[in-house]
Amino acid sequence: MARVLDTRRSRFLLGGLVLAHLVVISRQVDRGGGTSLLGQTVFAVLSPLQRMVGAGLGAVLATWSGYVDLRHVYRENQDLRVRMAALEMELQRQQDRLREADRLREIADVKPSLPFDTLLAQVIATDGVPWYRTVTLNRGRADGIALNAPVISTTGVVGRVVAVGPRAAKVQLLLDHESGLGVRIERSRITAVVSGQAGFADHVGNMLAMKFVPVLADVTVGDVVVTSGLDRMFPKGLMVGRVQSVKATGGLFKDILVAPSAHFERLEELMVVRARPDGLELTEEVRPPEPKAVPRGAAKTSPATR
Amino acid sequence: MRVFWTALALLAALLAQTALGRVVPMQARVFDPFLLVVVYCGLTGGEVHGMLAGAAAGWVQDVHFGGRILGLSGLSKLLVGFGIGMGSTRFHLGEPGARLLVLMVATIVDAVLFGQLAQVFDVQAYELSPLGLIARAVVNGAVGMVVFETMDRQRRRWAPRA
């Protein structure tokens, strides 16, 4: 009996609720929609909770998104660093190749104009001690290099071979304190000897000293200095440098400094003279091109001694 | 007490639906946590409880996620809740397989009822494709099984204390 009553009650309840729903829906349809008081109340009560959930989730998602982005940026940063390092190395390699190509092109331009046989050699080592100025070349006796063979660059005389091995040769640079080279002032034809000034802690650095020039000799700053050939080692007329400063000392000779035309600070490919033709003097036309700028500072010229 | 738990479950459904809508907006439409509440109430509380829970769930859903006309979900879920409640008193629906079937059928019936009511009241609503309806039924069934199992365990744990 109770179950039947329950069932009846529930059916009545169902009928009532369905009817209520239909009425509520129908009224909304009649009015063209809009929220009822019940709807407004439910929405007002529960929407703050929704807003809280939304805000909380938004914050969590934003934090997570920021974290993921940060991780991504970090990884990307690492990748870019590696890539940049690789590209920098590649760029450096390409620039080296370009410079090497330029140097070789210079040599290739100059080499045919030289009236003697030269051999291209690469500098494989530079001086390891501060007291001497030497470089080692990758060519030796097997390549036809002889002792005392002149070594030149595209811009001027570099030095001479002082030791020869089967596959390597040591070159004493003009800058070395022990070097010596017979030269001539091209304009006034005055002969002299130049030697290096470099020594241990020598303040004159990469200058050459021109010795044995009488005080009355006609030498001015900027005069071109070439090899005289009198030392019987270097061919005549090779560019050595330009007079950088001339000073009159109290003695018999002038104190002259010569700026070498060879770029000693960046020696890489050099030419070794294999056969030295006696009595051959180079003309102005066949001389290797002179350096574009005086490489070492301003001229230390004393006007009185010009 | 039953009213309190039902209200709490509806609140949880509201928050879950809100959260899902924020996290996975597209996938959130496939899942209906309110229907799970209605089905569970109908299965465990009978037709009156199921009916009232359905009406409440439908109204909350209507108010927060519904369209221009309120009450369509309320009415459809009311009928679903009543049907399940009535069925639970006549059939043994406590087994997992039966529950899964009830969940899936309830999902389909709810969607069909809603669609029909929308047509009757000339309400423009998106119609679920058969594939979408099946997906919704499967998802509701799968999630519902997990939720129902969890709820049953909690009820068993709380029952001796009470």
Image (tube, coloured by chain):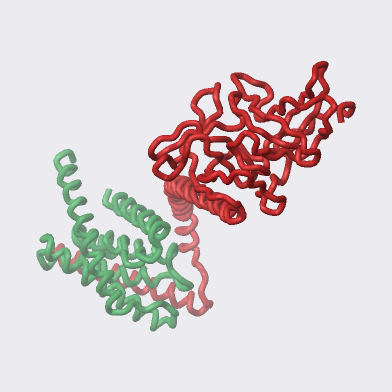
Chain colours: A red, B green
* Image mark count: 0
> Is A235 situated left or right of B33 in this image?
right
User: Quarter holding the N terminus of chain A?
Assistant: bottom left
Describe residue A249's horizontal placement relative to residue B117 as left or right: right
Of residues A253 and B5, the one drawn nearer to the viewer in this rendering = A253
Can see residue A9? no
Instruction: Look at the picture and state if A140 lies above or below A197.
Output: below
Farthest top residue in view: A250
Which quadrant of the figure contains the C terminus of chain A?
Answer: top right
Give the quarter of the image for residue B50: bottom left
Image height of B70 relative to A93, above or below: below
- Give the quadrant of residue B28: bottom left
Q: Identify the residue at horizontal 29%, vertical 72% (top origin).
A: B110
Q: Looking at the picture, how far across and down is residue A183, in whole percent?
A: 69, 35
Give the residue displayed 66% in from the left and 33% down from the top. A182
> Residue B95, percent across and down?
10, 61
State the residue at coordinates (47%, 50%).
A90
Q: Is residue A259 left or right of residue A64?
A: right
* Image location (x, y in percent) of residue B30: 32, 67
